[in-house]
Image: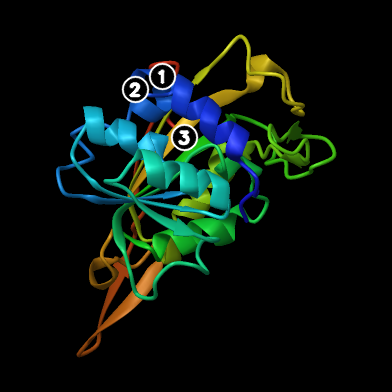
Amino acid sequence: MTYKDSMLNSVLFNEKQRRMCDYFKSVAHFFTPEFICPGDSVLDIGGASGGFLAAINAEVSRIRGTVIDPDPRAVGLGYDAFHEIEFILGEFPEAMPQYRTFDVVSMQALFPQIPTWKETLLQMAGATKKYINILLLLRLSGTTVIDKDVSYAYYLDTGDRVHQVIHNIYEFINFLSISEMRAKKIQIYGYHTPYSGDNFRCIPNAEQVKANAMIELWDEEDNPFRMGAAHDKGKGNTDYSFYRPEIEVFIDDKQFDVYKT
C-alpha cells in the first residue's frame, strides 16, 4: 500500500513542517482541540518519521501517537527524534497488532496515491473507535480518476510514478455512507488553489480542490440501519429506517450542499 524509501521526504518534512501552520490549512482545520483531546490514541498511516504527530503533540493536545510506515530508515529517524511516539515498521493493516483500535486514524499525503481507496477506508474504519481523517484531492464534477498513466506524480525519493487519485466528491461521500463504514458525521473542508504543484493531474488547477475529511464513526452496536432498510421489531411491527450520515462540506469557506448543488 505505502511507498518504501521515504528518507528524503522524512528529512524534508521534519525540517519544513515543524508546526501545524506549516501544513495545508485543510489539514490543520480538523486537528484542533475540538476533535483531538488529551490522551487520545492517534495512528498516522504512512507517517514516516512522525513529524506530523509531533506537531500535534506540541501545539494541539498531548496524544498517544503511533506511526506505521514500511521504510526502516524513516522509522529509525523518527525513533531517534521523537521518543514520545510509538513506531511500527511495516504495512497497514498487516503489521498492526491484532484487535488494536485507536481514537483517530489518519492518512495524509498517502491517500491520493492509493487506487484501492475503498478497501483502505474500510480497513481504517476497522482500526478506529471515533474518527478517520484523510487528505483528499477532489473534483466537484466528473468521475473519480484512478489511472497512473494520466493522473500521477513522481515520488520524491525514488522517482517512481505513483497515482494521484482525484475523487469525485459525490462518489466519495456516497461510499462513506454505506453501513460498513459506520459514518455518523462526514465533514469536508477544502479550497481551490491557483497552483497545485508540479504533479501531472488530469484536470485543470481551477477544477481541483485540496481538501481534508474528518469522518466521525458510530460504535458497532449503535450503527443505525441505512436509508430504506426495514427492521423487524417483532410482534408484527416493522420500522422503516431512513438514515444517512450528517454531512457538512465547506469549499472556499462557503457551505457546499451536496444534495442541492
The residue that disc 3 covers is 258
Q: Residue furthest top?
A: 194
- How far apart marks 3 and 2 lie (CA) works out to 33 Å
x%, y% of residue 113? Answer: 65, 43
Of the residues shown, which amino acid type is indicated by label 2?
A: Arg
Q: Determine whether label 1 and label 2 are within 8 Å by CB.
A: yes
Outermost residue on the bottom side: it is 235
Could you tell me which secondary element the residue under label 2 belongs to?
loop
Q: Residue at x 57, y 55 (%)?
A: 70
Q: Which quadrant would residue 91 be assigned to in this image? A: bottom right
Residue 46 at least partly seen:
no
In this rendered view, identify the residue nearer to me: 15 or 155.
15
Residue at 24% x, 73% y: name it. Answer: 221
Is residue 243 visible to us here? yes
User: Which residue is depicted at the point 61% across and 32% down?
Assistant: 8
Against 6, residue 209 (above or below) is above
Instruction: Please give the label number shown on residue 172.
Output: none
Looking at the rendering, in which quadrant would you find the N terminus? bottom right
How many residues crowd around disc 1 within 10 Å: few (fewer than 14), some, or many (20 or more)? few
Q: Quadrant of residue 214?
A: top left
**Which residue is label 1 attached to?**
22
Residue picked out by circle 2 = 19
